[in-house]
């Protein structure tokens, strides 16, 4: 095991279940891979319906943040749901997940968001911010996703640039990584 100059122990590398690409093998990445396997093997999604690691870049107050959406579920060409993983409390992950679902696709608000710590989950309505269901069984299977696809509204989030900016600021604030050395992480070149 090696310890990088950042946040996680890296055990080596692993192969991404969805894409086959090589990724750093961390405890968090192992949970993400378990989620991908759950969606395909148990919940019936095809690998092609899962878009891993989509990102939203923000800069506010000279703070660059890349918010990563662990998985985006796309059914019949529509992004139905995002899934964000993070260890610990789910409640603290709700608001940034809703913000991400509202702004990730410029065409429309993605209707559902899931926050999970790998052991528990919450299914969120991104229009209202309400928790629709809890537990790992709250993640809709592929059959339910087909029904939800017909029931959900895929309307643009808003025509108001200030509301969009507010959601981007929420992502920037919640997803800011502070290095374990009590310093800001190095900003990548854009």
Image (spheres, rainbow, N blue to C red):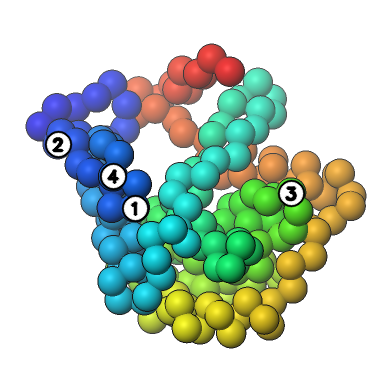
Badge 2: few (under 14), some or many (20 or more) residues near its Cα, within 10 Å? few
The quadrant where residue 113 appears? bottom right
Between label 3 and label 2, give the one nearer the viewer: 3
Q: Secondary structure at mark 4?
A: loop
The quadrant where residue 20 appears? top left
Q: Secondary structure at mark 3?
A: loop
Residue highlighted by disc 2:
11
Between label 1 and label 3, give the one nearer the viewer: 1
Between label 2 and label 4, give the one nearer the viewer: 4
Residue highlighted by disc 3:
106
Where is 35 relative to 104, above or below? below
Q: Could you tell me residue 33's position as x and y percent?
A: 28, 54
Disc 4 and disc 1: Cα gap in Å? 6 Å
**Does the residue at mark 4 contact the one at mark 1 (Cβ under 8 Å)?**
yes
Q: Quadrant of the C terminus?
A: top right
Disc 1 and disc 3: Cα gap in Å? 24 Å
Q: Earlier in the sequence, mark 1 or mark 2?
A: 2
């Amino acid at each position: 095991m090696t310890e990088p100059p950042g946040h996680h122990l890296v055990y080596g590398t692993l192969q991404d279940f969805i894409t086959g690409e090589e990724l750093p093998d961390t405890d968090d990445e192992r949970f993400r891979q378990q989620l991908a396997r759950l969606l395909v093997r148990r919940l019936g999604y095809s690998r092609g319906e899962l878009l891993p690691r989509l990102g939203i870049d923000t800069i506010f107050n000279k703070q660059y943040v890349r918010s990563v959406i662990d998985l985006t579920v796309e059914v019949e060409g529509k992004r139905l749901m995002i899934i964000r993983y993070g260890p610990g409390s789910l409640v603290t992950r709700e608001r940034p997940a809703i913000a991400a679902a509202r702004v990730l696709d410029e065409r429309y608000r993605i209707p559902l968001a899931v926050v999970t710590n790998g052991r528990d989950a919450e299914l969120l309505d991104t229009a209202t911010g309400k928790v629709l269901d809890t537990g790992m069984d709250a993640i809709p299977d592929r059959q339910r996703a087909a029904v939800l696809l017909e029931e959900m509204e895929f309307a643009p989030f808003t025509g108001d640039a200030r509301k969009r900016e507010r959601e981007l600021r929420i992502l920037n604030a919640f997803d800011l990584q502070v290095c374990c050395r009590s310093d800001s992480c190095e900003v990548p070149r854009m």
